[in-house]
Image (cartoon, rainbow, N blue to C red):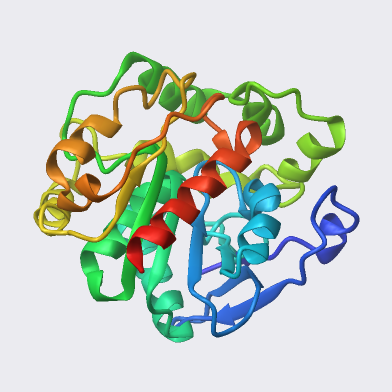
Amino acid sequence: MTIYRTPDAHFADLPDWPFEPRYLEIPGGLRIHYVDEGAADAQPVLMLHGEPTWGYLYRHMIGPVTQAGLRALAPDLIGFGRSDKPLERNAYSYAAQVGWMRAWVEALDLKNIILACQDWGSLIGLRLVAAMPERFAGVALSNGGLPAGEDPPRAFAIWRAFSRYSPLFPIGSIVAKGSKRLLSDAEIAAYDAPFPTRTSKVAARIYPSFVPLGDNVAVPDQLKAWETLETFDKPFLCCFSDGDPITRGGDRKFRDHVPGAKRVAHRTLHGGHFIQEDDPAGFADAIFDVAKAAR
């Protein structure tokens, strides 16, 4: 397996990103980068980014979460950010990413976790909740889901085709277009920073094809995960945005079928798909609601 590691120089002086990089090598030799802020014995908040972003997405939430007495952990998925990037397309799969992140959680021995997730962060994170529910205290879910063979929405079908055929796949510009707030040139460049070459974008380009909509190899695993979520009675808060055409209405299934969704008051956040850019305070408040309900 050929591994690409983005040179550290690409991460120098990123706006609003003062956090010390930490690394953990999981079985198999892949190295995961993560941010770990706050007291080591505080309740952990696992902030999982999605496609095609990295932990930088949570930069406006890490401070408020630690100031509230919680521990903020924001890892980069394999293939993203400062984590290792296998360059072969066949190194990646939905199941592989779940396994990599499970190995990371187990290596850090995280317990009593609050999951904060969006986009692919929810596809990975909710599978972790289903695989080891004893490690999780609650969930704050925004603009994401756990699809299991449904028909793809038109907006997603367009996105999947773009990820496959776009010659440049400009990651920073993609994030900017998926946000309602006007991102600065420096912020856009920060999203581009981990991906300085065409080959370094292989994971970012391939993951849309893995979303288990329609006839997809991951559907049986999704259905099994849903069986666990339908018994998950810890706080499960949906905080979807009012301006995301891809995930609009996606909270309904969780509110109807996850018992823990009855334990909290759900929120509507204001912004586009990348809600961490548009309403980070609202997303952080949702995390605090989950932490309070989980006590």
Write down the quadrant of residue 153 in the picture: top left
Can see residue 93? no
* Residue 165 x/y as whole percent: 51, 24
- Direction top: furthest residue: 154
* Residue 131 x/y as whole percent: 23, 68
Q: Nearer the viewer, residue 232 or 167?
A: 232
Write down the quadrant of residue 81 in the picture: bottom right
Q: Tell me what residue is drawn at x 24 percent, y 69 percent.
A: 133
Q: Nearer the viewer, residue 7 or 45?
A: 45
Q: Tell me what residue is drawn at x 76 percent, y 29 percent.
A: 183
Q: Tell me what residue is drawn at x 85 percent, y 47 percent.
A: 15
Q: Nearer the viewer, residue 44 or 294?
A: 294
* Residue 8 x/y as whole percent: 82, 65
Q: Left or right: where does residue 130 sit relative to residue 94?
A: left
- Vertical placement of residue 222 versus 66, above or below: above
- Vertical placement of residue 212 versus 152, above or below: below
* Residue 149 x/y as whole percent: 16, 35
Q: Tell me what residue is drawn at x 55 percent, y 82 percent.
A: 25
- Vertical placement of residue 49 versus 82, above or below: above
Q: Left or right: where does residue 18 sit relative to residue 58?
A: right
- Vertical placement of residue 162 versus 30, above or below: above
